[in-house]
Amino acid sequence: MPLLSVSHLSLTLNAQQILKNVTFSVDQGEVVGLIGPNGSGKTTLFNVLSGFLKPTDGSIHLRDADITSVSPAQRAKLGIGRVFQNFGIFREMTLEENVLVALEALPKEQRMLLGNIKDVVKGTLDMVGLSQHAKKKAGSLSGGQMRLLEIARTLKSGKELFLLDEPTAGVSPKMTKQVAELIAELKKEGKTVLIIEHDLPFISQICDRVMVLDLGEVVLNGKPKEIKHDKKLQEIYFGADPTA
Amino acid sequence: MLSCLLPTGNYALHLLAITSMTMVHVLGYNVIFGKGKILHFGPIAVSLASGYGTFVTLTWTGSYLLAVPIGIAMAVLLSLLFTWLSLRLEPDGLGILTIAMHQIVLTVVLNWTPVTRGALGLPQIPRMPWLQSNVALTSAVVLVATAWFFLMLLFERSTYGRQLQALAEHEWYAKALGINRPRLYLIAFLIGGIGAFITNLFYHQYLYLVHPSDFLFPVLIFYVMIIVAGKPGSTMGVALSTILLIFLREELRCLPIAASVLGPLRMMLFGIILLAAVWYRRDSLFPKKRTI
Ligand SMILES: Nc1ncnc2c1ncn2[C@@H]1O[C@H](COP(=O)(O)OP(=O)(O)OP(=O)(O)O)[C@@H](O)[C@H]1O
Ligand SMILES: [Mg+2]
């Protein structure tokens, strides 16, 4: 059984259909890339998956549980972790508090399993080399550091399904490599990842499968190698080829 | 001729009493308005319901044993109502509606004369047996306020405090971590409500009177001013600014200047303090809208 199944998902906002009959599934441990031009509905799809927007139609299942009308907080408790396009970090809190607040939001049984929560906080900051900034406000971090912190925090709070919205956006080229390594680490740990990215080489390198969204529709869905040379993708990304 | 000296004797006792009583409600309200950044302007509506609940019952039955639970129940009831509103309305709508709620409750109190005696207020409030003297009452409220202060400090540093702060900074980010907004808001409003109950319970015994003029909008503005000046959400800061601003408010009454000048001057000074505080905290007062 797939970890996530989405079927016939549609969303209309202000009389504008933003998602059209989106159907796909993601298996446990799979890393799936989601690409598409600006405004094609990628972030909106994530908002529906994490419960912030109610779909007009269709359903979402996590394993065999129908979560279509479950609240965002409840979905987080069920193991869906979200990494936001604009850094989902609390800038007024210290780095330490940013990790702590995520761990404390876990269901009680899960929090018990963590053991000493202070050690987990320290371990999380160590993992991304930010321990020496533990007491600083997170707002003082660079984009790359915030991204690392956010992903590490999501990983350490035991999430199963990761929704990563452009994890390399706003990250310096040097740190992009570190972010990529951290995502590879997620894969190694058997996590399931849905990742929105514009960078095609990056995507084909780390993803088992790629889906292409255009005008709210899934127009391609396959292995990176298979879709790379697909005409449709060329059209969407580079416009119709005049030499063809 | 009055002059401003360091307060001594009964006057010092009086300052201590009103500062402590005010602090309890303001620190409770600070959890909602300061820490949670919830645009709730109805703390005085809660005061009205709880204060009148307590002392109407007392006037009619003569029993604190009945009056106290009713006062608490009224505070909880209004807090539940405000929690519900805060979860359903956008911040601007909530702000306006809570101000309207204050006005509505005030109107009810002023016009339901058979029960509340309207503008006459409820006179001759008997004190609890062990609070008969001002020394006893002041000692009790200082003790209560100190305990409440430490409780609020604990809350601020607890899981709930952090979660409320997270919700205040970015609702979606907080929810995506699994933070339960309805629960946190309920806790915040209940703390505010209990604070209102405690303050009213002592304040009207202290005055031997419940009077509608103690529940007008200037009280709300004074509370908001204390919180903004003290640093919204900071228990320590708000406690200090309560002490400072009440001291200032009372001491400014007795500067050696003609009353006709001092009166407006005092009001203007307060206006300026509020403006300065808001200006100083303009960036942190309300959460910035950030795209996700
Ligand atoms: N709350 C909303 N109300 C109305 N329209 C919306 C809303 N949210 C998104 N949209 C519209 O939905 C469309 C898809 O937006 P979305 O942010 O999902 O695109 P995206 O694929 O993530 O783009 P980008 O690559 O630029 O991040 C856009 O046309 C946007 O204007
Ligand atoms: Mg987007």
Image (cartoon, grey):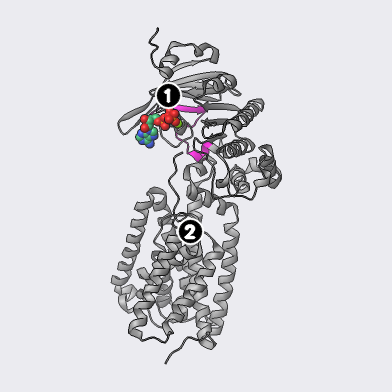
**The CB of the residue at mark 1 lies under 8 Å from ligand 1:** yes
Query: B112 or B153: which is nearer to us?
Result: B153
- Could you tell me residue B209's position as x and y percent? 41, 80
Label 1: chain letter: A
In the image, is residue B273 above or below residue A69?
below
Where is residue B254 shown, x and y percent of the image? Answer: 43, 85
Asked if residue A112 lies left or right of residue B2, the reply is: right
Of badges 2 and 1, the one in the foreground is 1
Report if residue B201 lies within the magenta region.
Answer: no
Residue B59 picture location, percent across and down: 40, 77
The residue drawn where x is 57% and y is 67% is B149
**Subunit bearing disc 2:** B
Residue bounds of the magenta highlight: A55-75
Q: Mark 1 points at which residue?
A: A37
Q: In which quarter of the image is ligand 2?
A: top left
Q: List the single residue furthest toward the bottom.
A: B1
* Residue under numbered circle 2: B34
Point out residue B99 in the picture as x, y percentages from the top left corner: 34, 61
Q: In which quarter of the image is the N terminus of chain A?
A: top right
Q: Which mark is residue A47?
A: none
